[in-house]
Amino acid sequence: MLNQTANVGLCALEMTNLRALEGTITEHTVRRFGEGSFAPALVLNTSRLTGFGGVPWPRTLGKIAGTEHTGLVAHYSGRRTTIFSSAPFLPREVLANVADEAGVHRYLDSLTEVVRADSRFIAIHTKEGGPRTLNLLTDCTVTDALTGEAIGSGVQMPMNLPPDSTTILEITPANQ
């Protein structure tokens, strides 16, 4: 997996044989900045806003409640969509709609799971668990990355996720 990291440049991370990993689970408490409303907040001055490369921000998606301040804006440039939000922690439904509009592939139709994926692994964290359908980009063979158990093959496959769990899957394209 290759990523650009601010002030560092290109970084490479390669993960192999997850079945060999073991260790202690560490929990972290999430910290907040006080209770109630979030302040101070950054807002956009839309009268001076030009977007990237002089292209105007074409779409206001929301305003801060009780004010005329723009709080949620989308900028579209080619295949790129940039979102600015004054509020932290946008609801999943908002992020899912933005992703759908941008043509982002969804591995699961449900919004209740957290999914992280790259070209080789898919990690699915679920609170509720239950039956889900895994949607892949191409025909693949899927195995449990920790146990090596075969899950299935194809472009879509049913799965039953256990509650309060994280499932790590390894995907191998059918043509390999």
Image (cartoon, grey):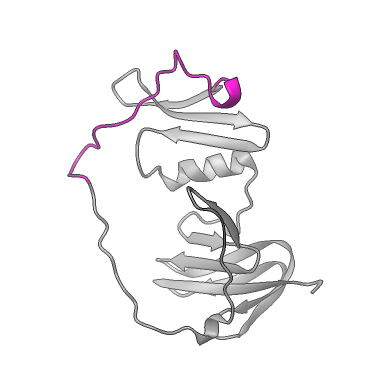
* Residue ID at (23%, 49%): 32
Residue 120 highlighted magenta (yes or no): no
Q: Is residue 24 above or below residue 133?
A: below
* Residue 175 drawn above or below residue 78: below
* Residue 122 in the figure: left or right of residue 112: right
Question: From which residue to which does the magenta span run?
Answer: 33-56
26 or 137, nearer to the observer: 26
- Measuring from the top left, give residue 11's x and y in whole percent: 56, 59
In the picture as drawn, the residue positioned furthest to the top comes out as 47
Residue 146 seen anywhere in this rendered image of the structure = no
Q: Residue at x 34, y 81 (%)?
A: 24
50 w.r.t. 115: above or below: above
Rendering coords of residue 45 (x, y %): 40, 18
Q: Would residue 47 be found to the left or right of residue 119 on screen?
A: left
Name the quarter where the N terminus is drawn: bottom right
Residue name at image x 62 percent, y 65 percent: 134
At 33% from the left edge and 29% from the top edge, which residue is drawn?
42
Is residue 49 highlighted in magenta? Answer: yes
Please state the horizontal and vertical placement of residue 66, each as a whole percent of the image. 28, 22
Instruction: Please identify the quarter of the rendering in which residue 13 is found.
Output: bottom right
Give the side of residue 8 with respect to residue 158, left or right. left
Q: 162 or 91: which is nearer to us?
A: 91
Quadrant holding the C terminus: bottom right
Q: Viewed as shown, does residue 63 lie left or right of 114?
A: left
